[in-house]
């Protein structure tokens, strides 16, 4: 076999360009794999952020309701109780028509105190945080993994609020 020098240079150039193309293809595929992993990580972080934001929003709304209830109770409830006590003292010390008006005022004050206590106790009740919704947001769209979440069989959580 006889090869001239032009053919061997051409073969060397072809081999070098083929090798460079293979290195480029390998580099491009590694970059694509890395970008896909970064997209998946970014999507997971975004889901965690959405779930955390949802829980924080629910918690903030619950804290605001408790704060409003506490303020209503502290301000109106105590004043109404003091008014009822004063009216009961006046009821024992008055006679005649004045006593009827004091008893009527006492009944209205007790009714008003009951009307204040009802919404305050409703506001103070802890709403359960919707964990199912937050976990669903967290797990939605995770590639290559399927979740089956069943919340109906979970025990109901009751939290205790200290006044």
Image (cartoon, grey):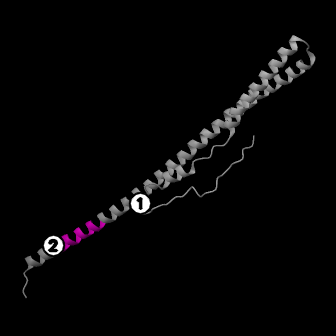
State the residue at coordinates (72%, 29%). Answer: 116
Q: In this picture, is 54 found above or below 76?
A: below
Residue at the disc numbered 2: 14
Q: Position of residue 70 (x, y in %)?
A: 71, 34
Q: Residue furthest bottom?
A: 1
Q: Is residue 112 left or right of residue 99?
A: left
Q: Are marks 2 and 1 in contact (CB under 8 Å)?
A: no
Q: Position of residue 159 (x, y in %)?
A: 69, 48
Q: Nearer the viewer, residue 101 or 65?
A: 101
State the residue at coordinates (8%, 76%). Answer: 6
Q: In this picture, is 13 found above or below 3?
A: above
Q: Quadrant of the N terminus?
A: bottom left
Start-end of magenta stretch: 14-27
State the residue at coordinates (37%, 62%). Answer: 34
User: Residue 90 is drawn in which quadrant?
Assistant: top right
Residue at the disc numbered 1: 143
Task: Give the numbered dot on residue 39.
Answer: none
């Amino acid at each position: 076999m006889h090869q001239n020098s032009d053919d061997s240079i051409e073969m060397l150039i072809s081999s070098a360009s083929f090798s460079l193309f293979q290195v480029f293809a390998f580099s491009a595929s590694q970059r694509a794999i890395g970008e896909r992993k970064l997209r998946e990580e970014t999507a997971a972080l975004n889901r965690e952020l959405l779930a955390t934001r949802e829980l924080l929003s629910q918690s903030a709304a619950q804290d605001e309701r408790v704060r409003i209830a506490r303020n209503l109770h502290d301000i109106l409830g105590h004043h109404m109780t003091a008014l009822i006590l004063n009216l009961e003292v006046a009821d024992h010390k008055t006679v005649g028509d004045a006593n009827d008006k004091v008893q009527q005022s006492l009944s209205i004050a007790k009714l008003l105190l009951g009307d204040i206590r009802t919404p305050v106790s409703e506001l103070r009740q802890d709403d359960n945080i919707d964990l199912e919704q937050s976990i669903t947001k967290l797990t939605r769209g995770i590639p290559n993994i399927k979740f089956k979440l069943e919340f109906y069989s979970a025990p109901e959580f009751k939290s205790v609020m200290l006044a």
